[in-house]
Image (cartoon, grey):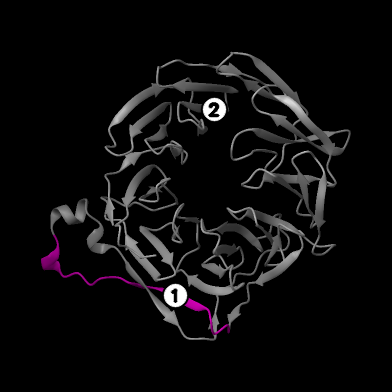
Amino acid sequence: MNFSEVFKQSNQLCKVSPDGKYLATCVQYRLVVRDFNSLQIAHLYTCLDPVMHMEWSSDSLFILCAMYKRGLVQVRQAAHCVLPRRTHDLRVTVWSLCTKSVSYIKYPKACQKGMDFTADGRYMALAERRECKDYISVFVCDNWHLLRHFESETQNLAGLEWSPNGCVLAVWDSCLEYKIILYSLDGRLLSSYSAYEWSLGIKSVAWSPSSQFLAVGSYDEKVRILNHITWKKITEFEHPTTIINAKAVVFKEVEKRPVVGSEDLSIHQLTVDNSLFSTQSKYEITQLPAQVPVIKPDPDRANPKIGISALAISADNRYLATKNDNMPQSLWVWDMLRLSLLAVLVQTAPVRCFVWDPHRPRLALCTGNTKVYLWSPAGCVSVNAPVEGSFQVQSLFWHCSGSSLVLLSKEHICLCYMEKDMMPR
């Protein structure tokens, strides 16, 4: 791996344009757009207030910056035009950057994920709340014509998400009830699934890239896989405290701090370079049966740290990665072809973020230290980010080409360039 120099950012606001050509970061009031290959500044904008949210348009021509304190949104274009808008009403406002027209949608529901677009950008689904009932509206994005409006069979809708092919809309209830409902594009009820009653329900949902499977994580520490033909459960994955599956490999991170003699020290190393004192780590394969570190959740606190909070399926639909909140140091990898546990990565610190390579079965993760971790069917690797100062990796994401990773610390970013022959297919 090779690493770039470090750049500043604020509020973890750093995104690559959909075409992969530009890297946008926000530093307080400033929006900085860099050429991704050279990292040279292409555009520099000053906003009216600190930016709290940033988003690229799908064609990579516009950047949206939201300033929550002012209730203000600014849309930037490479031609340096600014389109400011302000709203304080409880509604969704749609501004056309082509015709300059404005449309309003009333009664949006404030929930975990109340709005979603199809992958091709043709349709938008919006959750609404009217007269103590949940409704869903489907709009055609070309002219914002209302395609369908129907009542949702949920008690308290918590989120919705289109399948990658845009044919099915998954809708799930709040955590107080385990219920997920599948609707067609025209609003027909396809199926409804509930695994149990009278206990905390759904915590996370993820579609497979092929739209053939829907993974549902819940507070009972299980993941259930639904198929796209009957929308019935084909299997469920448990997260046991003791791993006895002989086909699974348990990779345990082992740390080792290097011993440094006084003759190895210099003023520069003591004041600037911390690589000399960096804790090195590697993975060791643990013999079975293997114990997984567990924390006991506090039952008196809201949103207890238990259950499957994060799911991700690889680009080839072959592997599923999961995180169980009361086993925060472990990342689980499942084989979707054999429907069995394949690997468990036991880290020395809680897993903060994990994401699949957009083209290859390669998983990157971080735990809030100076390292980047990678898993593939070939094995695991731990790499220390050799940057000056203390760069604690809080989150990361892949470039759309899969050739590099963007690493984010609390106030900085760094690019990690992957070697072509690293962790082969």
The single residue placed furthest to the right in the displayed view is 131
Is residue 90 among the parts visible in the rendering? no
Extent of the magenta region: 244-265
Q: Decide which of tag 2 and tag 1 comes sooner along the chain.
A: 2
* Residue position marked by numbered label 1 in the rendering: 252
Quadrant (top left/top right/bottom left/bottom right) for the N terminus: bottom left
Left or right of 191 in this view: 398: left
- Residue at 64% x, 24% y is 142
Q: Tell me residue 407's x, y (percent).
A: 39, 49
354 or 387: which is nearer to us? 354
* Residue position marked by numbered label 2 in the rendering: 66
Q: What secondary structure is found at the residue carrying circle 2?
A: strand
252 up-or-down from 244: above or below: above
Residue kind at label 1, given as amino acid type: Lys
Residue kind at label 2, given as amino acid type: Ala
- Residue at 24% x, 59% y is 275
How busy is the neighbourhood of tag 2: few (under 14 within 10 Å), some, or many (20 plus)?
many
